Amino acid sequence: MLKKEASKIVGGLSVPSKMPCYSINLPATEYALKGRYRFKTTKRAMARRLRALAHGSWTAAMTALITGHKYFRWHDSGDLQSVQHLKNIFEVAKATPGTSHWLPTREHSLLSLMDPDVVPKNLIIRISATKVNGPAPSWWPWTSTVSTQSKTCPAPDQGGKCKSCRACWSRSVPNVVYAKH
């Protein structure tokens, strides 16, 4: 599949300025209310990508767009929509073994009964804590928390960019602590 056709099927990829890679975003009006997420064009693009999840060639199209990229972040806005959405992401990760995938999520219910060993080795799913300064979920091996006191994410000290940091994509980092902003 050509990348042009793939991009049309999935609604295009996003290019978050902080990230060292492409991403895909979906509507998340309850928490993506700052910066470019407020623009009408961005809102239309996210709605288009949400509708595209039902396309029969979505998995093949995402695979075509991600192939050849070293890193990929799922959902710089938005989150998992269903068990099928997660299964499709697993298929994309398996089909792109040369790419490190990072999937942050708040969808505890979708993962709470899942064995982390079934997650493709090139995909890390980080479960987000539910409260600022709250504990990391203890039932999943890779998590993220938000703190007003400390951080492990260097982005705030690097102009809001990841730069050379890849902690979020690393299974050797059990919890990434983000500064509240």
Image: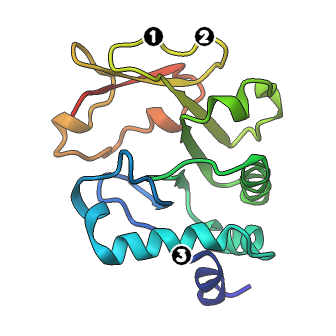
Quadrant location, the N terminus: bottom right
Q: Tell me where residue 117 sits by quadrant.
A: top right
Contact between marks 2 and 1 (CB within 8 A): the answer is: yes
Task: Please state which amino acid type lies under the numbered disc 2.
Answer: Ser
Q: Which mark is drawn over residue 138?
A: 2
Distance (Cα) linking label 3 and label 2: 35 Å
How packed is label 1: few (under 14 Cα within 10 Å), some, or many (20 or more)? some
Whether residue 130 appears in this view of the structure is yes
Name the residue located 58 percent from the left edge and 81 percent from the top edge.
7
The residue that label 1 is drawn on is 135
Task: Please state which amino acid type lies under the numbered disc 3.
Answer: Arg
- Secondary structure of the residue carrying tag 2 is loop
Q: How is the image coloured?
A: rainbow
Whether residue 13 appears in this view of the structure is no
Name the residue located 78 percent from the left edge and 76 percent from the top edge.
57
Q: Which mark is drawn over residue 48?
A: 3
Q: Tell me where residue 154 sits by quadrant.
A: top left
Distance (Cα) linking label 3 and label 1: 35 Å
Mark 3 or mark 1, earlier in chain: 3
Query: Percent position (x, y) of residue 151?
Result: 29, 21
